[in-house]
Amino acid sequence: MAAGVAGGHGGAPLVRGDDGLSHSRNLHLLSRWALRGHGKSWRTARELQVQRGRLNRTVVRALTDANLLLKRTTYDLADAREEAERARQPESHFAASISDELRTPLHLIVGFSQMMYTSPESYDGAAFTPEPRGDVQEVCEGTLYLSPFAHDPKALHWCGTGRSHRGTTVALGS
């Protein structure tokens, strides 16, 4: 019986035939093909392990750096918060003491100027001309503007902004 050629594996053709020699040769060819495939797979797996190791080291290094940066930022933030609190202490103390010092005189000025503006007749029929009446109105509006600061020391941050405390506007009757 004649030997034929079948499809090859690994570049070597398989031999068809009845004798034991062709089976042995086929087995040898298939074994070489399997070993070459196994070798390629092993090298690829090893390369992937090396790449994974590099990637793991890179990720660990990046996470360590990020963690250190986060810790530094947290410490800096805590320091800034403490510094801000220390800076607010004198302001709070000043606001509390000025509040007590301003409250009584402001109440007197507001009450007195409101009475002068709204009831000038209570001064034995004296009539204010428009100019002094306007002056009394300005005094009253100014003290009304300052009143919230005397009652609420936290309102001092409005000083110098040109806005009224809590958005209130001062208006006296005409």
Image (spheres, rainbow, N blue to C red):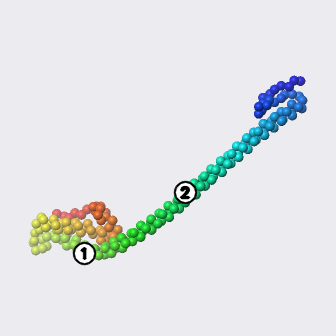
Q: Is residue 118 visible?
A: no
Tag 1 secondary structure: helix
Quadrant for residue 41, please give it.
Answer: top right
Q: Is residue 19 left or right of residue 145?
A: right
Q: Amino acid at mark 2?
A: Ala
In the depicted view, which residue is nearer to us: 173 or 87? 87
- Residue 26: x, y in percent? 83, 33
What residue is at 24 percent from the left and 75 percent from the top?
A: 105
Query: Residue 31's spot in the image, x, y percent?
Result: 81, 38
**Which of the two residues, 24 or 133, is positioned nearer the viewer here?**
24
Residue annotated with mark 1: 105
Report the quarter where the C terminus lies. bottom left
Could you classify mark 2 by the number of other residues whose Cα lies within 10 Å: few (under 14), some (14-19), or many (20 or more)?
few
Which residue does the numbered mark 2 point to in the structure image? 66
Residue drawn where x is 10% and y is 71% of the image: 126
Q: Position of residue 69 (x, y in %)?
A: 53, 59
